[in-house]
Every structure is written in C-alpha cells, then in structure tokens.
Amino acid sequence: MVYTTKQRYKHDLKVHEDDTSKQKHQIKSHFDERIIGMRHIVVFLLFLATTISYATRVSMSVTILGMTKPNKYGFPVFDWSQSIRDMILSSFFWGYIMLQIPAGMLTGRFGGRLLIFVSMAATGLLNLIVPFTANVGDWKAVIGCRIAMGLFQGLLYPSLHGLLGQWAPITERSRMGTIVYSGAILGTIIEMTIAGVLSESQWGWPSVFYVAGVTCLGWSVLWFIFGASNPGESRWITKEEMKYVQCNTGPTDANEQKKMPVPWKGIWTSLPFWSILLAHSGQSLGFWTLLTEMPSYMDKVLGVDIKSSGYLSALPYVAMYILSFIFSWTADFLVNRNLASLATTRKIFNTIAFWGPAISLLGLSYIPTGNIPLAVALLCVTVGLNGAHYVGFLISHIDLSPNFASTLMGITNGCGNIFSIMAPLSVSAVVQDETNAADWRKVFFISVAFYFLSNLFFILFMSGKVQDWNEPKSRATLEDGFKSDKKSMKKKETTGEHKF
C-alpha cells in the first residue's frame, strides 16, 4: 500500500503509540503502584520541607508581638513602631524574590536536591542567630537576618516544582502536589499556634527561633540521606519503581532536559503563562496581607491577647488545610470521569480560591468591632476557600510546560512575591489608626480588587494544553522530522491533558 506523507506519518505514529502503550502496560502489570515506595518518601520529605519553611517564614507575624510587649521572665523588649514592625515582616520577601528565576533555571539544569538542602540548612542557621542579632543590632540586624532567610528560601519553590515533575507520576501528581504544597498551610497552623505559647512561656520569644532552627537542620540531615533530584539518582529506589515513575512522569528525560535552552520568547509571549503570573501576584497580595497582619488585627481591633490571637489566627488555616484535600480529590474526580476538561477544572477551582475569599472579605470589612465569633467565622471562610488554588493556578505551570515548570514557577513566584512585600507595607500606608476598623476595611478592599481582576484574566486566557515552546524545535532532515514530530506529539499526548 502506498502512503502519502501525511498518511505515513499517522501510520508510524499509531504504531509508536501502540508500542509505548504496551510497554507501559507491561511495566504496570509488574509493579503495584499502591505499595509505598521511594517516591512517597521523597514527597513526604518535600511536604515536611514546605511545612518547616513556612513555619519559619510566618513565625515573625506572631513572635513580633511577644518581642514588643513586656514579659515577666526578663527577656528583651523592643520599642518598635508599627512601620518598623511592618518593615521587619516584609523584609523576608526582599531577599526571597532575588533568586526565584535563577533557582528555576538551576533546578532545570542541575536538579533540585542540592538547592533544597542549601535552602533549609541556611534557614536553620539563620533562625538560630536571630535572638543574638536582635540583642546586638536591634531591628536593623533582624531585618538583615530576614532578608538572608528570604534569599535562601527563594530556592525552595522552583526546586519543589522541578522535583515533582521528576518524581510524581501523572496519575498521582494532583494528590502529591497537594500534599507537598499543603505543608505551607500546616506550617502556618503550627507556628501560629505554638509561637504565641512559646513567646509567653518561661523560654520566651527566643525559643521560637531556636525550635525553628533545630527543626530545619534536622530535616536537612534526612534530605541529605534520602533525597534525590530524580529516580535515576536515588540510591534507595527499586528498579521496578524507577521504571514505573520514569514511564509516567511525562517530561523529557532528565539528561535531555538539562541540554534544552529556555524558550524565553515563547514564555513571555504566552497569554496562558501571563494568566498564571497575574493569578500568582493576586494570590500573594491577598494571602500575605491576611497572614502577616491577622495577629495585629486580632490584637488591635478585636482586643484578643497574644496567646488567644495565635490560636484564633490559626483556625482559618485549619479550614484551608482540610478543604485543600477535598478540592484536590474533587478535581481528580471531575477530570478522571471526563466531567470537565483540565483547563475548565483549573478555572473552576481558581475561581473558588479567588472570588470566594473576595466576597467573604467584603463581609468581614463591615463586621462591628468586637464581634469575635463572626470575624473568625468569616476569616475561616476567606482563607479556607483559598485552599482551592493548589489545584488552580499553582499547578498549572506543569500543564503548560513540563520541561520548564521550575523556570515558570521561579518567574511567577518571584513576581508574585513583589506583591507579598507590598502586603505589610500597604497596611502601613493605609492604616493610620491601628484600632480603627474603617482603616482596616481599606486594606481588605485592596485585596478584593486584586483577587477579582487577576482571576478574571485567568478565566479568559488560561489553557490546559502543553505549549509549543515546551519542546525544542527540530533541526533534522525531513525523514528525521517524522520521528521528531512523533516524539513531540507523543509527549503532548502523555503530558498535556494529564490528570491531576
């Protein structure tokens, strides 16, 4: 039978797909994916990394109240104005944004194992010296430590995205991604609960930093022993599991991926990428306004003491932690049952994560002063619904480009955290009287506007398909071009509309 060029290409592609499908079926038939394997250990360690890093990141939000209030155990008390306190809270992000893009590129080229190790170990050491530097250099020294801490933690998220791309099989990626990134919520809950208790205990506010430092260093030891950038580099993984993961992760082979140049023009001219970038920015401003300023709002407006403030401030994040898993399993259900496409699912849950909190914040801004139960209830709704963003924009980088997901995360996380810096600083600029609920209402209005507009752009322009610039352009001959195109189309088929 004589084939035209197009018919020949389709015939060869069909044969290639059938062979690959048989190969995957054979691997699955010899490997029980329900068995706990090395990929689960790596994901669990990454979950601990986000938990611990976020705990150290948000600890200052509660601890700063203990550092500026008299205590009965003789620990130093600092006379810091609201503007100084807001500078301390925002200083973390001054360093955090600097290494985002370089970290994404380095992860794609060298893997994430070393970068995460350096990030966590340095964070631990810096936490240990915060009490000393505060006593010696006052608020300027504390800001210096927070900037350095942000600088090293800037390596974390791009590395996480790259590692998930290598370790999380397509059929497990939604749950694994939610598990890893939900550690940020759990870390927030733990720190907001414990920081206030430790600050008022006989060990005082310095103990918050000592506990954080030791925990970071302990995790670093575990990661040094068990961590790996990909299954091929792991000393502990079985051959069967390695084949299973490598056959179902989707992106290009790790060695091939390291040689691929970053398609900067394709990235910056992609509207779906811009939709993720703006969504990340809106999320950062809204989320970090609540996260950094909620203890102060509880203390100044509602009149809640520091220990109760820690407990009440943590409640919304408990709601967020629980709901994030419900959203994750619901997203899987919608896609796996073909009830909604991947792109539609992303948009549905991003809308829940953005417009839901926007409506709740409007209600929160008009609550009468002193109505603690209603305020806490609305805060729980606001922050809880925001947990849907884990299956919204946050995982969409891998949808657009499995090969450059870490670089995309570095860009969006870096730009997004410029808005994280603006969060506490905007409070200083807007709130003239810390006890005036009307001033805090203006802060909430700013967050509502960002939530609404950024999600609107996401709805209009987000795509669930792998972008053309994800694969390098072929420079081969016509005959080789058939093979290259088959490979490219195969990757898009297996990694584009994959199920999270």
Image: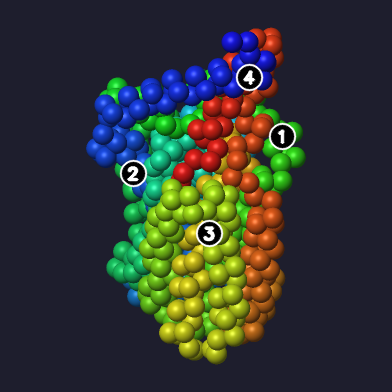
| Disc nearer the start of the sequence (4/1) | 4
Name the amino acid type tagged 3: Phe
Report whether 365 appears left or right of 115. Answer: right
Residue that numbered label 3 is attached to: 349
Q: Nearer the viewer, mark 3 or mark 2?
A: 3
Residue that numbered label 2 is attached to: 44
Question: Which residue is painted at 68% across and 61% down in the image?
Answer: 456
In whole angstroms, how far apart are the C-alphas of marks 2 and 1? 34 Å
In whole angstroms, how far apart are the C-alphas of marks 4 and 2? 47 Å
Report whether 202 appears left or right of 270. Answer: left
Name the amino acid type tagged 4: Gln
- Percent across and percent down for residue 159 are 50, 38
Would you call the spot at circle 1 few (<14 residues within 10 Å), some (14-19), or many (20 or more)? some
Question: Which residue is painted at 42% across and 53% down in the image?
Answer: 333
> Which residue, as the protein is rendered here, is positioned at the far front?
1
Q: Nearer the viewer, mark 3 or mark 4?
A: 4
In whole angstroms, how far apart are the C-alphas of marks 3 and 1? 26 Å
Q: Nearer the viewer, mark 2 or mark 1?
A: 1
In whole angstroms, how far apart are the C-alphas of marks 4 and 1? 30 Å
In whole angstroms, how far apart are the C-alphas of marks 3 and 4? 41 Å
Q: Nearer the viewer, mark 4 or mark 1?
A: 4
- Percent across and percent down for residue 10 are 59, 22
Tell me if label 4 and label 1 are in contact, CB under 8 Å. Answer: no
Q: Nearer the viewer, mark 4 or mark 2?
A: 4
Residue that numbered label 4 is attached to: 7
As drawn, 471 above or below 483 = below
Note whether residue 236 is visible. Answer: no
Foreground of the two, 382 or 191: 382
Foreground of the two, 371 or 388: 388
